[in-house]
Image: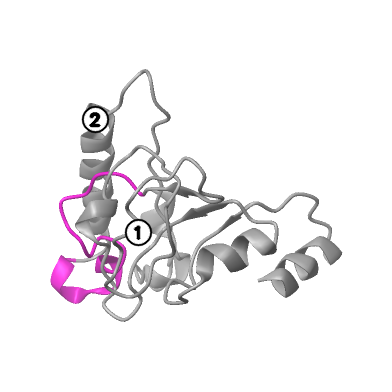
Amino acid sequence: MKEQVDLLKQAGATRIRYWSGGNLYLNLLDAASQAGLDIMGNYKNPELQKTDARLLMIHPWRPAGSPFATDLTKYVQHSSSGKIIYLPVGIFSRLDHASMRRSADAGGDWEYFDSLTEGLEASLRATRADRVNVLQFTIHAGEFRGNPTAPFEVIDT
């Protein structure tokens, strides 16, 4: 992780705090902290392409320990001395919301964006004025097939 941070700084970045991915490493949070990172988001088990239901919320926390495969016991437990802040994705009705955009069973690109709208609405209903409220999602533009003559039309719209 430190090597990647250093490469980004060589490319001109001045402050790097956030990462996502690399979710199956036992000492992930320690490695990130040693690399100067302090904010993580978008945890999902890459083998299952699903998010654990305990992570579908909108209020960040400091995990007591690293996530590892299906054992998120310490990861979902808040520790005021935790070095890393976890930014949750929001409230979604499906645990596979991150991978459903690649699934023909989901009904296509428009249905994926409809699910994002539903997640935004559910997340907005759960906001609290006395807390930080977060909703985030990642779009990989190449995953939206769309019209071959206008491949990014669904994103533009």
Describe the element under mark 2 as helix, strand or loop: loop
Q: Write the start and end of the magenta stretch as one range.
A: 89-107
The image shows residue 125 at horizontal and vertical percentages of: 22, 28
Q: Identify the image's colour scheme: rainbow, by chain, secondary structure or one colour.
A: one colour
Identify which amino acid the numbered label 2 is placed on. Answer: Ala
Relative height, residue 155 to residue 133 (above, below)? below
The image shows residue 104 at horizontal and vertical percentages of: 19, 75
User: At 39% from the left edge and 73% from the top edge, which residue is drawn?
Assistant: 148
- Residue hosting label 1: 74
Q: Residue furthest bottom?
A: 47
Which quarter of the picture shows residue 26? bottom left
* Main SS, magenta residues: loop
Q: Is residue 46 left or right of residue 1?
A: left
- Residue hosting label 2: 126
Crowding at dot 2, Cα within 10 Å, few <14 / some 14-19 / many 20+, comes out as: some
First along the sequence among labels 1 and 2: 1
In space, the residues marked 1 and 2 are separated at their CA atoms by 24 Å
Q: How many marks?
A: 2
Describe the element under mark 1 as helix, strand or loop: loop
Q: Nearer the viewer, residue 5 or 101?
A: 5
Crowding at dot 1, Cα within 10 Å, few <14 / some 14-19 / many 20+, comes out as: some
The image shows residue 105 at horizontal and vertical percentages of: 14, 73
